[in-house]
Amino acid sequence: MAIQHLFELPFPVFMLGFVGLSCAIYIVRFISDVIVNIFFSPLSEFPGPKLAAATTWWSAYQQAIRGRSMHHICMSLHEKYGDIVRIGPSRLHFNHPSMYDEIYRRRWDKDPFMYALLGGDGATVTFVKYEDNKRRKDILHTFFAKSSVYNVQWLIQENFCGHLGKHNERGVSSDMTLGFRCLGLETITATCFGKSASCFEYEGFASPILQAMESIVAWFMVFKHFGLFRRVILSIPDLLEEAVALVIAGTDTTGSTLTIGTYQVLRKPEIYKKLKAKLLEAWPNLEQRPNAGDLEKLPYLTAVIKEALRMAPTTTSENSRVVPAQGATIGGKHIPGGTIVSMGVLFPMQHEDAFTDARVYNPDRWLIFRGVFPGA
Ligand code: HEM
């Protein structure tokens, strides 16, 4: 049929034909992409589920529909396939601690797909270009200098502990999960913006800001895999601001690590007793509080905190990076340029080759390993 006759067809027939043809083109394109991705991609040699290699819809389905976290998916994939696993047409995930520095001690850009989830390219956490990220960090550096943090230690001593004391006097228990998150939020707003978020004013630390943040989290997986939806929502002004990113980056992270650390100390009486004894040694007169600098010098307290960070580094996301055009070697394998590589912090922290009995909360390991592990 000549092309001009197409336009003489009745409109519904024309539309039906148009939609049918578009679908056919999409399906052919999809099938050819799947074949190329599985059999002819430079990543074809890496093991992993065939569906993951075939299409990005595999991880979208796993996370958004089946509700599985990428962290758990990768853990089970590593058990089955080894230390390097293909988790997408252009994605590899790594497992062994020796590979961590090979990815993160480089000046590689972040993966735009993953970091768009956190609000686009406008804050330190989300800048995907290494140079942009560094420029912003150089500016923020002063906020996170020790002296700035020491300046807000009264938040813990007076506000946080003050409220815990009041709860105690009234015989009510304190919700430490909310309390620690309030503390995180207050510390960031005080350090970075010189303002209080008034979290502690709410009964049981139930600040509406924290509740609002909680409800955002549920939307993250939808945001991650449905880009158009994300762009519409995030076009609302101010959400892209560094301030919001910092509040999000610093509140739940700090809150969860402190909650899990406290839980671990309380469930092990021997650790609790030892920590209490060490604190009383350094703080014999309860009326005279030590400052943060004095507390930092206590090796056992430091070990308790390090072990909490090791067990609960909080972020389970992939922290993906883009391999530069010339490619790179990771785990002894050549990784082609443009590949998205990731590991996440929990993998090296909970690997038996780095930490014996890695699933056990044991602050002593930091004292024993002192001098062996850098920074212990
Ligand atoms: C226990 C507490 C915390 C944990 C476990 C934690 C964990 C992490 C991790 C794993 C990353 C790397 C993410 C990536 O590579 O994509 C990161 C990045 C970042 N975090 Fe935290 N964080 C904590 C507290 C905070 C706080 C209190 C703030 C500030 C208010 C903060 C601000 C940032 C920023 C700005 C980045 C981006 C750094 C960069 O891109 O170079 N974090 N954090």
Image (cartoon, rainbow, N blue to C red):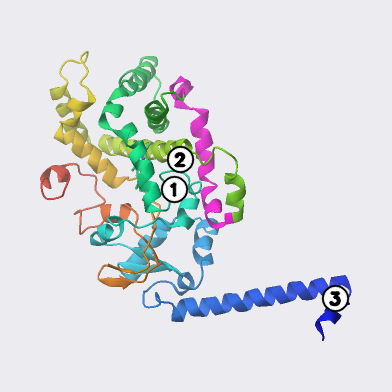
Q: Main secondary structure of the magenta part?
A: helix
State whether residue 66 is above or below residue 2. Answer: above
Label 3 and label 1: CA atoms lie apart by 48 Å
The answer to which of marks 1 and 2 sits earlier in the sequence is: 1
With 183 as the anchor, is 272 left or right in this view?
left
Residue at 23%, 41% (x, y): give it: 306
Residue 172 visible to an observer of this rendering? yes
Residue under label 2, please give it.
Answer: 245
> Taking the image as four quarters, which one is ligand 1 found in?
top left
Residue under label 1, please give it.
Answer: 126
Dot 3 and dot 1 residues touching (CB under 8 Å) = no
Percent position (x, y) of residue 55? 51, 70
Instruction: Indicate yes or no: mark 2 CB to ligand 1 under 8 Å.
Output: yes
Residue 56 painted magenta: no
State whether residue 154 is above or below residue 106. Answer: above
The type of residue carrying mark 3 is Phe
State whether residue 154 is above or below residue 39. Answer: above
Percent position (x, y) of residue 359? 26, 51
Q: Residue furthest bottom?
A: 1
State whether residue 346 is above or below residue 135. Answer: below
With 37 as the anchor, is 356 left or right in this view?
left
Residue under label 3, please give it.
Answer: 7
Instruction: Indicate yes or no: mark 3 CB to ligand 1 under 8 Å.
Output: no
Dot 2 and dot 3 residues touching (CB under 8 Å) = no
SS at mark 2 in the image: helix
Magenta residues (range): 198-227
Tell me the quarter of the image containing the N terminus: bottom right
Dot 1 and dot 2 residues touching (CB under 8 Å) = yes
Residue 223 painted magenta: yes
